[in-house]
Amino acid sequence: MEQFLKKILIIYFLFIPHHAYAEEISKAFMRGHENGDIVYIDKRTSSHRSKSVFSTERITEDNRVIYKYAALGEGDYDEYKNVTFYIEARVEEKGGLLYPIYSFNYIKNKDGSLVARYEKTFDYMKQKIYYIISDSKGAVVKKTVFPMKGLTVDGPTMIHFLKTFAAHRGENSYKTFYLISEKAQLYRITIKDMGVETLELPAGKIRAIKLRLVPELGLLTGVAKSLIPPTFIWYAEQAPYEWLRYEGLETGVGSTHIIASKTTLRK
């Protein structure tokens, strides 16, 4: 635990910019810099599952506006028990939307040894998404290429991407997107506006937009579909629509049903 806390301090210092950002909100409702903490709960048992710290930073490269997201956590993740996980992703903002560039997730034992690695690369020239899963020795165990059918994200990039959908939830053009799960499954997702409610978080109560994410499950039978819990995501009612909570499967079909909540709110 002591070693993990040291890592948390390191990541905070690594991702805090060395110059001050003006409090400017982008067209995709992204801040120049943000830090936060997330706690993950097993929905069925109400038991603590894991926790993480995250940071998002705005970067300008070759006149492109890019956001770097990083998260460091410990606990149970997917089928892995008592591990650490490091997630990093980059997205580019264009026309008020966020387009993933890459994301990766390293799962490690507490001694630092690798357990598994998940890497996704988004190639907009070829309109393809490359997904590679490697084992503890770095050997590739699965390689998948997905066609880019439309706006596509994965778990690490979805919570930021959907801010724009929360802001424009009454407009028909903001109703669907595609999601790649950690299990290497591609789903077309329909967004349903569930209205505004008072959400109770570890940091207190807040008025929140509630969205339901409904996947197209294709050939799954009615019985199989009934075993998949509904997926919800909440954002603050006011701009910049801060992400607050996620409730659904952790990494895809067959994974743990979780509740992930921010433990601090931006003042």
Image: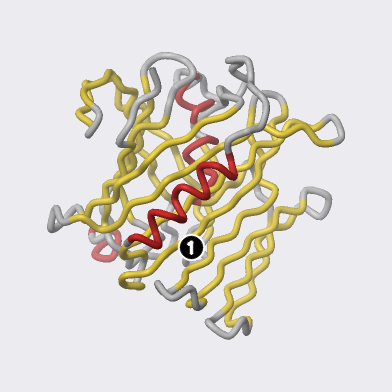
At 53% from the left and 26% from the top, the residue drawn is: 164
| Frontmost residue, 178 versus 81 | 81
- Packing grade of label 1 (10 A; few <14, some 14-19, many >=20) is many
Q: Is residue 29 above or below residue 1?
A: above
At 37% from the left and 41% from the top, the residue drawn is: 37
Residue sticking out furthest to the right: 62
Image spot of residue 64 (x, y percent): 80, 32
Q: Is residue 135 above or below residue 144?
A: below
At 50% from the left and 54% from the top, the residue drawn is: 187
| Frontmost residue, 257 versus 111 | 111
The residue where tag 1 is placed is 182
Res 138 quadrant in image: bottom right
Q: Amino acid at mark 1?
A: Glu
Q: Is residue 9 above or below residue 133?
A: above
Using residue 122 as the reference point, say whether residue 197 is left or right of it.
left
Res 193 quadrant in image: top left
Residue sticking out furthest to the left: 45
Label 1 secondary element? loop
Using residue 12 as the reference point, say whether residue 101 is left or right of it.
right
- Count of number-bearing discs: 1
**Quarter containing the N terminus:** bottom left
